[in-house]
Image (cartoon, rainbow, N blue to C red):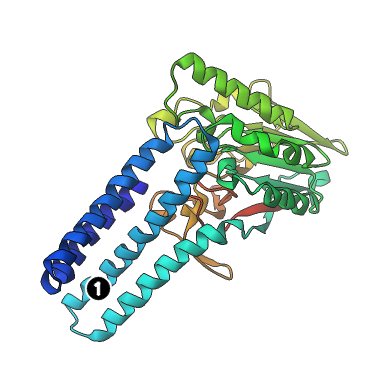
């Protein structure tokens, strides 16, 4: 995604350079603008590469913050380009002022998202109705947490502790952690282990892995080192009190009624992400027809559960709602829809329902505006 933004920013740069800088500025200004734009692009690529090579959790965070500043510049240029290009058709100064205003808004929004927006967590309250739900699970409360990407809160451990207090105050029946616990390294969990252990639910805490939890976003020295890392991550998740479901199920009983929680390893559309998540293996020996599915990537819901009404509800994350968008009341917009048909909220299709969380943490760049972090409180109703 960052490389796409960089490509669009380069196009915007060429437009700005030849339309304004080349035509209206001195040679010295032209050279300085060209050097600044080139260095910004080169440093962004080098930093992005360094992100996948570093062995330090603190460097992950620091690189992300610097990339966030560069992103603010790229977004500003793209906004100016998108609006200003219309002045080639409509010869009016109003559009130029709009372009300047929106450019400033874009830059300030990005900076706000880094400094404040990524900490502005809220509870997303959802009611899921299904007639197949066993009577004794009517009113059952699920707390869903997704996409923690814990390195994005490096140095902000107190904030995470406060969020845990908020979640515990919901008094959930069950907690479901739907993947991407870390961004790259298992050690991202270490400063937060006590807080993760403090998360409480009456019927337990369940977790699955997301695409970032498999060590695929780092250049390891060997496959053995990568596998040892992945096993360490699984051990830490279990030490935090979560029942880690790796293509497995667990049965919840309440007043003689039974509900199955099925947890899949991550599976998506890309070749790298289509190697895990075996639903048939997860169902082995399962004879309960009311099932809750935990699947990190929402694409699996459409790919494999079309019409399978036993899975009355799937909980997913992964999209982050692109960490950017506009939210006004119940209405929201994010360009995330261009990649994911199910990118945030509750959807229904052929008797199945899925809730996609926009998550809590940040991927690579610690920034959120509009699509602020959330945990979901989901109440089941007949």
Mark 1 crowd level (few <14, some 14–19, many ≥20, 10 Å Cα): many
Q: Which residue is mark 1?
A: 84
Q: In the image, what residue occupies the spot 24% across and 61% down? A: 12
**Residue 250 placement (x, y as % from top left):** 73, 29
Residue that lies at the very extreme toward the front in this rendered image: 28
Whole-percent x and y of residue 84? 24, 73
Residue sitting at 17 percent across and 68 percent down? Answer: 21
Q: Residue at x 28, y 46 (%)?
A: 42
Instruction: Work out whether 227 lies above or below 17.
Output: above
Give the SS element for disc 1.
helix
Residue 43 visible in the snapshot: yes
Q: Residue at x 45, y 44 (%)?
A: 63
The answer to whether residue 301 is above or below residue 120 is above
The one nearer the camera, 351 or 161, is 161
Specify the farthest residue to the top. 224
Where is residue 11? Give x, y as percent: 22, 57
**171, 41: nearer the viewer:** 41
Viewer-proximal residue, 177 or 350? 177
Q: How far across and how far down the image is residue 194, in percent?
A: 75, 37
Is residue 370 shown above or below 340? below
């Amino acid at each position: 995604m960052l490389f796409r933004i960089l490509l669009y920013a380069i196009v915007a740069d060429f437009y700005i350079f030849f339309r304004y800088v080349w035509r209206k500025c001195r040679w010295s200004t032209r050279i300085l603008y060209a050097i600044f734009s080139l260095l910004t692009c080169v440093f962004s690529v080098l930093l992005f590469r360094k992100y996948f090579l570093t062995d330090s959790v603190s460097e992950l965070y620091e690189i992300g913050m610097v990339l966030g500043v560069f992103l603010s510049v790229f977004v500003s240029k793209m906004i100016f380009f998108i609006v200003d290009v219309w002045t080639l058709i409509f010869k009016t100064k109003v559009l130029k002022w709009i372009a300047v205003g929106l450019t400033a808004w874009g830059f300030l929004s990005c900076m706000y998202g880094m400094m404040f927006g990524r900490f502005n967590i809220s509870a997303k309250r959802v009611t899921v109705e299904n007639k197949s739900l066993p009577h004794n699970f009517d009113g059952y409360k699920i707390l869903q947490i997704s996409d923690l990407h814990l390195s994005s809160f490096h140095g902000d451990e107190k904030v995470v502790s406060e969020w845990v207090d908020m979640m515990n105050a919901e008094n959930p029946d069950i907690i479901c952690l739907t993947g991407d616990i870390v961004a790259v390294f298992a050690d991202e969990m270490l400063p937060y282990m006590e807080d993760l252990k403090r998360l409480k639910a009456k019927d337990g805490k369940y977790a699955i892995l997301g695409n970032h939890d498999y060590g695929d976003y780092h250049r390891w020295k060997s496959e053995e080192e990568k596998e040892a890392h992945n096993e360490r991550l699984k051990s830490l998740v279990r030490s935090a009190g979560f029942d880690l479901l790796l293509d497995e199920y667990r049965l919840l009983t309440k007043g003689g009624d039974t509900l199955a929680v099925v947890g899949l390893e991550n599976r998506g559309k890309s070749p790298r992400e289509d190697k895990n998540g075996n639903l048939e293996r997860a169902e082995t020996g399962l004879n309960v027809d009311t099932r809750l599915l935990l699947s990190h990537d929402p694409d699996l819901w459409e790919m494999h559960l079309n019409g399978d009404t036993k899975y009355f509800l799937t909980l997913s994350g992964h999209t982050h709602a692109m960490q950017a968008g506009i939210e006004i009341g119940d209405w929201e917009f994010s360009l995330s829809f261009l990649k994911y048909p199910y990118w945030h909220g509750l959807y229904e299709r052929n008797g199945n329902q899925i809730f996609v969380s926009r998550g809590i943490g940040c991927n690579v760049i610690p920034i959120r505006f509009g699509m602020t972090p959330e945990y979901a409180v989901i109440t089941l109703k007949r």
